[in-house]
Image (cartoon, rainbow, N blue to C red):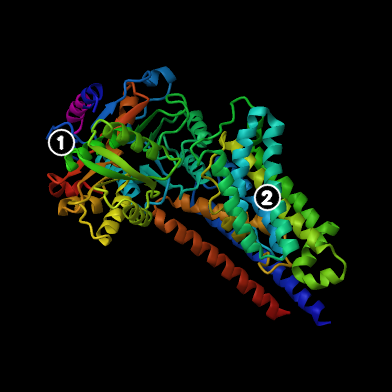
Amino acid sequence: MTAVRVRLRRGIGRGIGRQGAAVALVVMVLVAWLSFPRFGSPDNLRDMALQGSFLAIVALGMTFVIITGGIDLSVGSVYALGGVLAAYGSQWGFVVALVLPLAVCGLIGLLNGVLVARTGMAPFIVTLATLLLARGLLLAITSEGSTTYRIASGSAFLELGRGTVFGFGYPVFLALALCLAGGLVLRRTRFGQSVLATGGAEQSAVLMGLPVARTKVLVYTMSGVLSGFAGAVTAAYLESGVTVIGVGLELDAISVVVIGGTLLTGGAGTVLGTVIGVGLRTVIQNVINQIGTLDSNYQSVVSGAFLLLVVVLQRSLATRAARGT
Amino acid sequence: MSLPARVGVAVLATTALLTSCTSREAAPSAQGTGGPAASAAASQASGPGCARDRIGYPAVDVKNAVIGFSQSEKEANPFRIAETQSIKDEAAKLGIPSDKLLVTNAQSDLNKQISDIKSLLDRGAQLLIVAPLNSDGLQPALDAAKAKQVPVVTIDRKVTSDPCDDYLTFIGSDFVEQGKRAAQAMVAATGGNGKVAILLGSSGNNVTTDRTKGFKDEIAKTPGISVVAEQTGEFDRSKGQSVMEQLILGNPDITAVYAENDEMGIGAVTALKAAGKTPGQDVKVVSIDGTRNAVQLVADGGYDAVIESNPRFGPLAFRTLQDFADGKEVPPTVIISDDEYDRSNAAQKLANAY
């Protein structure tokens, strides 16, 4: 059966692709550790973990969306909106500060999902529209960005972003727990199977009686909720609902998902790969900082070149593996 | 300029003359002093000063310290280029070796700026100069600096945290004053009669609010001048141009343009020319920033005046840190002095433009 063989080969390619990112991550960490004395310092490691955790939560939702063959461009705006709503809601206590952003951002995700699944509109267009919608909503409730809601010091909500265990911030553990749960859901549940099947071969999935439309609605809702949550945690960390965050975050999220070996065409991908992708991105950024003398205009060039290098490395590993079989 | 402010500037200009020998910048023409008073500053008298012995920070001599500078955005516009360069130049002038000045750039990402500042601290920075990306949200970084007893001087944008407690002081321009001086330049250029269009900066930005307030309050004192139109050009040259095109169509009798930054002003000049007007003659143009391109236009006669927004924080920032180390009281806000370019001086002062 050729279909099985294709799937098998794709599976192997994917595995290698993921390992490619892992190999790149290990190499990067080793080189950085040896080259920069401060790279391995506890403070630096803690800070890198913290920086990566916000992106990881957003990228987790994006992983599911991309595996169904979709894309969610609204995450950056939704993330910023979540932060502002959390800070705004914090005046009524912990529960409101958490529920308000999750509910609103979940609704935006639901809207994305329903439009994509029921009307068959392109996810690119639908989520581009909600990107603008969420950013507009944010500007409306902050009087065009001039009002910044601050979280009162002493508010229990602050702990969510500022609390630490063994020096590592709560966001790190939250991100790890969510990614672990996400990985299990993707691999071990019917829903996870539907997600993979929807992106792999949508027609067959429909014929097999899988709830394709419902799956799509769910993944976009999940992406909205997770982005809103990441925003809320960020607000707790920053002690305020900062309006300028999240611009371009969707591209960061998409890039780490793809670097992690998830196919942009859908049907294959892992949460672990995404976590590795986040790690790579964070390490690259940190290394650029450690070099220190780099002109700011070249920092993006170097960062982009690094990403390209990783993708090429992955690709060559994958083709070699495919040739080997 | 109000009398107390004028006195304050004069006093500090004198102090600057005594304590600094730099002559890269001329004194603001408003003061009429011809001497070299590099980045003369008027300290605001409001609020108590911050003294090192009160908050118990160690004395760190600037010349022998590791200094961290966190820039907010790419050095892709003249202001940021000049700002970063000024920090580097001043460090070099003080004889600080380049490996003791650590520089990071947050690339407009707030989370990155926080981790930048933390990594500067981790790499041993004993003094910090920060150009904040946003007024809110840097608290985690400020807390980290506080925990290590590292004084933080913020430049060009004020943060909402508490001076002395969360950060040492803020050094920046008085944007209301800039608007006011632009209005005075406008009155001088128009002879006190005219219909002015305002190209506003981005909405929801305190720079826009302040530059608008300063201008309108001052221009209201001249009955011959009326503001006939105002619209945002978002601090952008091409937006400024297209907004200006629309404004001329709606109000063909506009005789003056106040642009809240040079880029929009330059865009307006292009639009005015396209509409058959002669900028600098039938339509007067005044803007704020002091970029090379705008000042060149003033020198060439196609523009009327430019109020500077001084990006050269280096001398003042290092001096403030040294003052703090020496145990002097540091005020919560230090105002950097801004120059002014008009037809009479633009050609000579062109080298000062950035």
**B11 is within the stretch colored magenta:** yes
Name which residue lies at 24% across and 33% down.
B223
Residue linked to disc 1: B36
Name which residue lies at 49% across and 64% down.
A305
Residue linked to disc 2: A108
**In which quadrant will I find the C terminus of chain A?**
bottom right
Report in which chain the residue with disc 2 lies. A
Q: Which residues are magenta?
A: B10-21
Residue B173 falls in image quadrant: top left
Which residue appears farthest toward the right when viewing the image? A209
x and y percent of residue A308 in the render? Answer: 53, 66
Whether labels 2 and 1 belong to a single chain: the reply is: no
Q: Amino acid at mark 2?
A: Ile
Report in which chain the residue with disc 1 lies. B
Residue A191 falls in image quadrant: bottom right
**B321 is within the stretch colored magenta:** no
Which is nearer the eye, A179 or A101?
A101
Secondary element at tag 2? helix
Residue A139 falls in image quadrant: top right
Which is nearer the eye, B178 or B313?
B178
x and y percent of residue A9 in the render? Answer: 75, 76
Characterize the magenta stretch by its predominant secondary structure. helix
Secondary element at tag 1? loop
What whole-number distance in Å separates the C-alpha atoms at marks 2 and 1? 59 Å
Which residue appears farthest toward the bottom when viewing the image? A2
**In which quadrant will I find the N terminus of chain A?**
bottom right
x and y percent of residue B32 in the render? Answer: 13, 32
Instruction: In the rendered view, tell whether residue B168 sits above or below residue B141.
Output: above
